[in-house]
Image: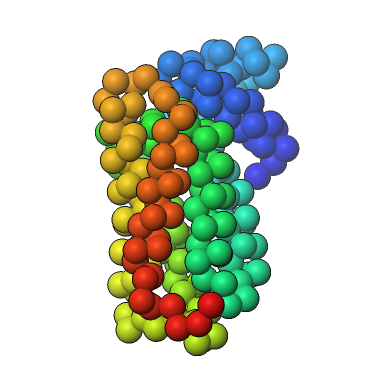
Amino acid sequence: MDNRKEEIIEVAIKRFSHYGFNKTTMNEIAEDLRITKANLYYYYPDKNALIRDVLCAIAQEANQREVAIIDEYHHNLMETLFALLELRSSYVRKYYVLHLCENLEWIKGLEFTNVLIEFHQRDIFNIKQLLTKAITAGEVKIEDVDCASLCFVEIVRGLGIMHNIADIVTGLPNVNKVDKILESQKRAAEFIFEGKIVST
């Protein structure tokens, strides 16, 4: 990605994070960049293409940080899972308006389907990597690591959506819910792995 695209994404993230995808125009982003709308359209022919790159940029940054946390695993599965949940929570808090928009139907058109599926699969892969490390270290007993990874990601994601449903429907963000989401996710993680931890 060239420097100009990175600059556009950075500016777009700021505006999208404040106003959301729907209420932000390409003209406003061009004005923020102090370029013409035509110049912006040279790099991004439509807003959906820009939104896709914005989501990918945020997800890639978060993924790199998640991988670093997983790489630090050392016989501390719950601590590592909590660190991952806390990291995800910090991104939800920072990009709460985008988090709500990501759950809206209009963003789940065909061109976004593959992107969202990729994010979901990456989440599952990361959890599988962590659980595999814990199994190999003898810290946890899990018969089906693929199923456990999928279930964990689905439960964590479902808890986030459950707490956000009112905000999603009304379009009125309440970032204070992020702490409640994190608390629910940690409680679920403890419940899921209760009795499976071999050593602490």
Q: Position of 151 compared to 4: left or right?
A: left
Q: Is residue 110 left or right of residue 89?
A: left
Extreme-right residue of the structure: 3
Residue 62, image x and y in percent?
57, 50
Which residue corresponds to the image point at 41% horizontal and 23% vertical from the top-left?
Answer: 173
* Quarter of the figure with the N terminus: top right
Relative depth, front residue between 26 and 86:
86
* Residue depicted at x 56% and y 49%: 87
Residue 21 x %, y %: 44, 24
In the rendering, at what x and y percent does residue 65 appear?
Answer: 62, 55
Q: Position of residue 117 (x, y in %)?
A: 36, 53
177 to the left or right of 200: left
Residue 38: in sight, yes or no?
no
Q: How many labels does the image show?
A: 0
| The quarter of the displayed image where residue 197 is located | bottom left
Q: Is residue 26 above or below residue 58?
A: above
Say whether residue 82 is left or right of residue 68.
Answer: left
- Residue 144: image quadrant is bottom left
Q: In this view, does 148 lie above or below 23?
A: below
Q: Nearer the viewer, residue 43 or 65?
A: 65
**Which residue sits at x=44%, y=59%?**
123
Do we see residue 61 in this rendering?
yes
Colour treatment of the image:
rainbow
Which image quadrant is residue 38 in? top right
Between 137 and 71, the one lying in front of the other is 137
Q: Nearer the viewer, residue 165 or 48?
A: 165
